[in-house]
Amino acid sequence: MRFGSPDFLYALALLPLVWFLVRRDRRKREETMRRFGDPDLLRTLSLDADPGKRRRKERLFLLGLAGVLFALSHPQYGERQLPVKREGIDILFALDTSLSMLAEDQPPNRLERAKGETAGALDRLRGDRVGIVTFAGTSVPTCPPTTDYGAVRIFLGGIDAWTVPTGGTAIAKAIRRSVHMLETSDAGSKAVILLTDGEDHEGDVLAAAGEAAEAGVRIFPVGLGLGEGELIPLPQAEGSGFKRNREGEFVVTRRNDAALREIAEKTGGRFYVLAEEPNALDRILDALSGMDKTEFESRLLVIREERYVWFLLPATLLLAIEFLLGTAGAARKET
């Protein structure tokens, strides 16, 4: 026999103490009665003065309490096996970590908003394998596809504007890195959720999107930032203020809808602007839920049978008898 909550069994060691306290209380009552007068006369007049009845009640109470403690310890005897299958698709979140993602037009800034949207999507996923790619001037495979969402959250929490050491923005490299991470997957359906402001400094984006389409990878770009543009705050390590170009002018970052829309069309995905559709990630996940799923894992889950009823019912009966015993005695004396 196993116990699901064995800590309650330790409380059984306190039963002798309970018994001692109950017995001491009974003795104090008896001593008090002797001080008042003739014990036989008091026993006749008192409804609760029968020592034999009180001792029976004490035993019933202690046995009932022991049964309750055994029931609370969740005794388990016997087991059954339940087949469990895990099915889903492969999903990569490609997060832009370039300096433009520090713009605060989507509070607290674009990058933190992208991380928050990704974390919210993880709460909805069931059974899908999830990975993360971060990119700026180059791309970094931050978390390989896994069903361990706790691990994904740990990697996600460590992402910041310094995750990728190379400055700039190379969306094509992010797409190719994502396709490379998915090409060895046995999943029948693969998707990339691209969270970026769409600014790109190296080009070749459509060619990379075409390669993704050939590999069967659908890309769902999510544009961050507002269309009118925003200044880029400098990281604390680089001083205060906002980023300037070589001529000393402030750099304004703007969301590039055209490039992101073309990526979506090329790969069979769909482009969303987060500022206009706050539930963009939910809509993407709804679309992904209709894709063909692959069985990633099949195993037998061993479930142990709970047997607390074996102890709870007798304990309840003993405590009920203990309670009714005094009441029944009172009724007989009244007649």
Image: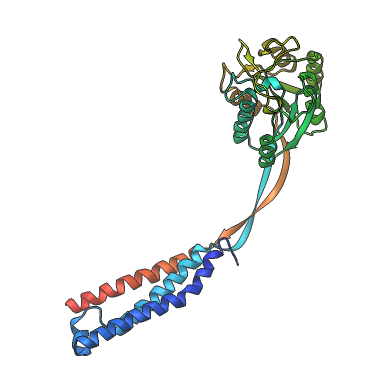
Would you place residue 3 above or below residue 93 in this image? Answer: below
Q: Give the image quarter of residue 236.
A: top right
Q: Is residue 220 visible?
A: no
Residue 311: percent from left, percent from top: 48, 67
Q: Give the image quarter of residue 176.
A: top right
- On the rendered image, what quadrant is the C terminus found in? bottom left
- On the rendered image, what quadrant is the N terminus found in? bottom right
Q: Give the image quarter of residue 197.
A: top right
Q: Is residue 229 left or right of residue 181?
A: left
Residue 146: percent from left, percent from top: 73, 38
Q: Nearer the viewer, residue 209 or 36?
A: 36
Would you place residue 193 above or below residue 36 in this image? Answer: above
At x 72%, y 42%, the residue is: 297
Would you place residue 22 above or below residue 159 in this image? Answer: below
Q: How is the image coloured?
A: rainbow
Q: Is residue 322 left or right of residue 266?
A: left
Residue 163: percent from left, percent from top: 74, 31
Q: Nearer the viewer, residue 178 or 333?
A: 178
Q: Is residue 80 visible?
A: yes
Residue 308: percent from left, percent from top: 51, 63
Q: Is residue 164 left or right of residue 288?
A: right
At x 25%, y 77%, the residue is: 329
